């Protein structure tokens, strides 16, 4: 198990001091308080933009998340760092586009059980930054940033870990048809459940896994109620195969997918209730979002992107725009935020409220959203870069989004199309990306091209971690 001490040793060996690599993200208004807030990030897997009742789903009921949205901020233009699991998660924990850390690839889209790579030790995670401020840190759920010991959460700043190291559909014991995956058996997926660095159950009983992640979170909160804590609760559902327990099975009007999402919502409610009972709700920021859009080929077992186009694996809006809620009673000003934000921004935002420091020896893509959260000011995020693997497919600036390349999700036939001139959409007017207005606004395309050139000027791609395989 790597520790913060080992990270400092790594930096020393590299000829860099910790002081030289960390820079304060904290504004003076927050720095005065020694009463550090707690943070809980709930991160779903493959949840679509249209899969919460507060985001418009007509038959999927999420009352606890609806309450969070009503009393917090609902962000309607909030983006994951990528449209598939591994790079998206890397972006969240590091605050950097995954191409910078080597956690994306055009040869393998995510890490697999035979992968030899993972999140490099040279990357600084938000958990490590918070450890320097005396935080207790925990990761519960799906990690998917490397399953070998040197890549696990406990090697990246988390005091404890309980979850599965990669997607819940991996380690298949036999070839499964689509129908097999829509009516799954736990025994067909030999996925390990780990506590810290040890496998404690295999195959993981996925029927009870949402409940257990929730209970682990609650126990951790109770254990550290008198100290600052950071919990990264990364559910491995509603990624297929879908599993739930008897309490929720066949209870949702939305079918099995709805059963699973409603169980996740119920767990969020239990966590909020725990915070309230411990009088921690007013000193805890809770964030809810997802890693990418819905996995559409799995029919009703995949989610819905609502009015957005396409889903997981694509750089259309349905692949990367996520339902997102920030909740912190008496701190965050309730409302609906249409400005852009990203999971990339959680690093700087959490660092800002905690007094933590981020690295200053590399390019960071994370922006501090606290002016929007606390003061109703406009979001500092004005651009978003959409990567598929290591290629830049699209860029959004303000309301406009240009597509240089488009491709659908996991299709056998090559449907990649390069666009010259790029496709252009006004997402404020046309969130479904139906009406190409490139001919009407050549000046917008020219402006976006300048943003691309500026982005690439300081881009140093990291070593591809996803192509490395265990020999």
Image (cartoon, grey):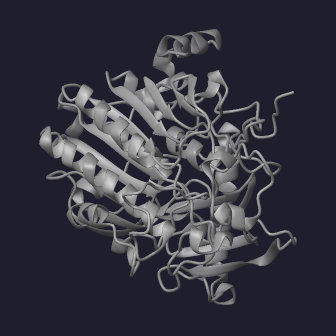
Q: Quadrant of the C terminus?
A: top right
Q: Is residue 401 left or right of residue 214?
A: right
Quadrant for the N terminus, please.
top right
Residue shown at the point (33%, 67%) measured from the top left: 62
**In the foreground, 236 or 469:** 236
Task: From the top left corner, tell me how far across and down residue 331 is, in percent.
Answer: 18, 51
The answer to whether residue 371 of the structure is visible from this angle is no
Q: Position of residue 78 (x, y in %)?
A: 46, 62
Image quadrant where residue 68 sits: bottom left
Coordinates of residue 108 in the picture (x, y in percent): 79, 48
**Does the image show residue 335?**
yes
Q: Is residue 46 above or below residue 225?
A: below
Residue at 22%, 38% (x, y): give it. Answer: 30
Q: Quadrant of residue 100?
A: top right
- Indicate the position of residue 395 as horizontal and vertical percent values: 63, 65
Residue occupying the point 65% across, 29% down: 120
**Residue in front for this viewpoint, 238 or 382:** 238
> For the image shown, how many numbered marks are present on the structure?
0
Whether residue 219 is situated above or below residue 270 in the rendered picture: above
- Horizontal side of 59 relative to 83 (left or right) equals left
Residue at x 24%, y 42% (from the top left corner): 284
């Amino acid at each position: 198990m790597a520790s913060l001490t080992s990270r400092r040793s790594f930096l020393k060996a590299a000829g860099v001091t910790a002081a030289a690599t960390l820079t304060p993200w904290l504004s003076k208004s927050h720095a005065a308080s020694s009463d550090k807030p707690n943070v809980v990030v709930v991160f779903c897997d493959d949840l679509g933009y249209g899969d919460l009742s507060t985001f418009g789903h007509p038959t999927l009921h999420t009352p606890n998340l609806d309450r969070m949205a009503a009393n917090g901020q609902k962000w309607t233009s909030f983006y994951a760092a990528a449209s598939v699991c591994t790079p998206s998660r890397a972006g969240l924990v590091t605050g950097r586009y995954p191409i910078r850390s080597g956690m994306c690839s055009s040869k393998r889209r995510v890490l697999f059980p035979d992968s030899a790579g993972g999140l490099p030790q040279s990357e600084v995670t938000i958990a490590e930054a918070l450890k320097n401020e005396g935080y207790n840190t925990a990761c519960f759920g799906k990690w998917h940033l490397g399953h070998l010991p040197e890549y696990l959460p406990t090697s990246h700043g988390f005091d404890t870990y309980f979850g599965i190291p990669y997607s819940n559909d991996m380690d298949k014991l036999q070839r499964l048809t689509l129908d097999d995956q829509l009516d799954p058996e736990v025994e067909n997926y030999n996925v390990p459940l780990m506590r810290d660095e040890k496998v404690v159950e295999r195959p993981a009983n996925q029927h009870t896994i949402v409940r257990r992640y929730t209970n682990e979170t609650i126990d951790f909160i109770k254990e550290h109620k008198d100290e600052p804590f950071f919990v990264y609760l990364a559910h491995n559902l509603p990624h297929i195969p879908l599993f739930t327990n008897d309490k929720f099975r066949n209870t949702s009007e939305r079918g099995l997918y709805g059963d699973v999402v409603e169980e996740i919502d119920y767990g969020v409610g239990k966590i909020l209730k725990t915070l309230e009972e411990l009088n921690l709700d007013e000193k805890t920021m809770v964030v809810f979002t997802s890693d990418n859009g819905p996995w559409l080929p799995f029919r009703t077992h995949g989610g819905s992107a609502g009015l957005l186009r396409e889903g997981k694996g694509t750089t259309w809006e349905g692949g990367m725009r996520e339902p997102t809620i920030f909740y912190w009673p008496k701190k965050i000003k309730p409302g609906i935020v249409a400005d852009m934000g990203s999971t990339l921004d959680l690093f700087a935002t959490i660092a800002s409220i905690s007094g933590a420091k981020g690295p200053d020896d590399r390019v960071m893509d994370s922006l501090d959203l606290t002016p929007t959260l606390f003061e109703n000011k406009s979001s500092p995020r004005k651009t978003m870069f959409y990567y598929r693997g290591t290629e830049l497919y699209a860029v959004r600036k303000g309301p406009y989004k240009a597509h240089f390349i488009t491709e659908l999700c996991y299709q056998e036939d090559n449907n990649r199309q390069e666009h010259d001139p790029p496709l252009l959409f006004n997402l404020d007017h046309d969130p479904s990306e139906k009406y190409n207005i490139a001919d009407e606004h050549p000046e917008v395309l020219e402006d976006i091209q300048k943003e691309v050139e500026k982005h690439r000027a300081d881009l140093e791609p990291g070593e591809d971690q996803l192509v490395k395989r265990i020999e």
